[in-house]
Image: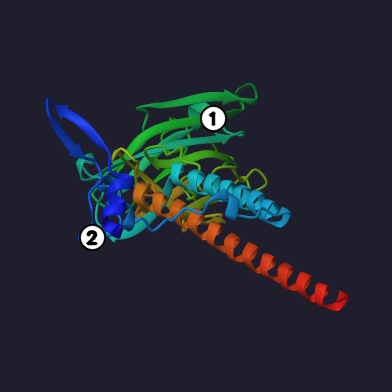
Amino acid sequence: MPHSELGKTLCMLVERNGPGTMEPLIKENNHGGFPIMPSLRGKQFDIYRKVPKDLTQPTYTGAIISVCCCLFILFLFLSELTGFIATEIVNELYVDDPDKDSGGKIEVNLNISLPNLHCELVGLDIQDEMGRHEVGHIDNSMKIPLNNGDGCRFEGHFSINKVPGNFHVSTHSATAQPQNPDMTHVIHKLSFGDKLQVHNVHGAFNALEGADKLSSNPLASHDYILKIVPTVYEDMGGKQRYSYQYTVANKEYVAYSHTGRIIPAIWFRYDLSPITVKYTERRQPLYRFITSICAIIGGTFTVAGILDSCIFTASEAWKKIQLGKMQ
């Protein structure tokens, strides 16, 4: 019997599609050879050919490498997941006025203690190059007596123009000037703009916090020279907050004029930097996270497979050498 006829006889299956209709499920190939099932033709594109378990050989070394491989993949996966969830802060510099809607104003928050000066003598004066000269500013300010009234804690919230100028704590607004006002002080807070509570942004937003001049000359004036840097913080939702960092230099001196000693004060002289610092929250893209995970899994399994293959090959070669010596 011809080969093609034998194949038809052994592998032909039929099913009933209707009265008197019979259709073969297995068809002969084009070369008249052994029949092939149509549903299995796509298997020729499988690049992941399977090996029967009976043809594989498990080893203790392979088991150890497999466990270590899985633990290593788990560790790297958790590391990548942590990095994907966490936000990254990117900073950039540019020349611009970020807070154009503020009307050219900067909000200032000042909190200072003068332990040896009565509250009725303490006042805040504001000056700038636009001609502003305000003595004894009292809006949004508060004076808290200290040391049974011998000292004073001054808290003020006010705005300044975006031009060089100064504000100073002094006795200039007092009705009667003291002979020897003691300007020793402690600065609890001096900040500009919105408050930023972001732990991963390290900047000089409150550079004078804790500045202690209690051991200074009581009759001395204090000059704090501030360089204010506009700062923008943009969160993941695109919301922007405007704040200001600043650098500071200070000096202490007893001032005199041709008429005698000048009444001391605590001066904060400021100027604005044209450079704006912008911090932006960003998160790793999803496609990059998936790419990293695929690289981790694929790379680890590949290296582990090469290592296991080398150990197994060396072990088999050693066994052959030992058998040769015994013979």
Image location (x, y in percent) of residue 304: 60, 60
Camera-side residue of 243 and 160? 243
Q: In the rendered image of this protein, does residue 155 appear above or below residue 59? A: above
Q: Are marks 2 and 1 in contact (CB under 8 Å)?
A: no
**Residue 128 vertical position relative to residue 158 in the rendered view, above or below:** below
Q: Which residue is tagged 2?
A: 32
Q: Nearer the viewer, residue 260 or 123?
A: 123
- Residue at numbered disc 1: 153
Name the residue at 47% across, 37% down.
171
At a point 65% along the width and 55% down the height, the residue shown is 57
Circle 1 crowding by C-alpha within 10 Å: few under 14, some 14–19, many from 20: many
Residue extending farthest right: 326
**Residue 227 percent across, percent down from the top left:** 40, 56
Total numbered circles: 2
Q: Quadrant of residue 185?
A: top right
Q: Is residue 58 left or right of residue 39?
A: right
Give the structural element (helix, strand or loop) at label 1.
Answer: strand
Which residue is outermost to the front? Answer: 1
The residue carrying pointer 2 sits among few (fewer than 14), some (14 to 19) or many (20 or more) residues within 10 Å by Cα, namely few
**Going by the image, does 89 lie left or right of 60?**
left
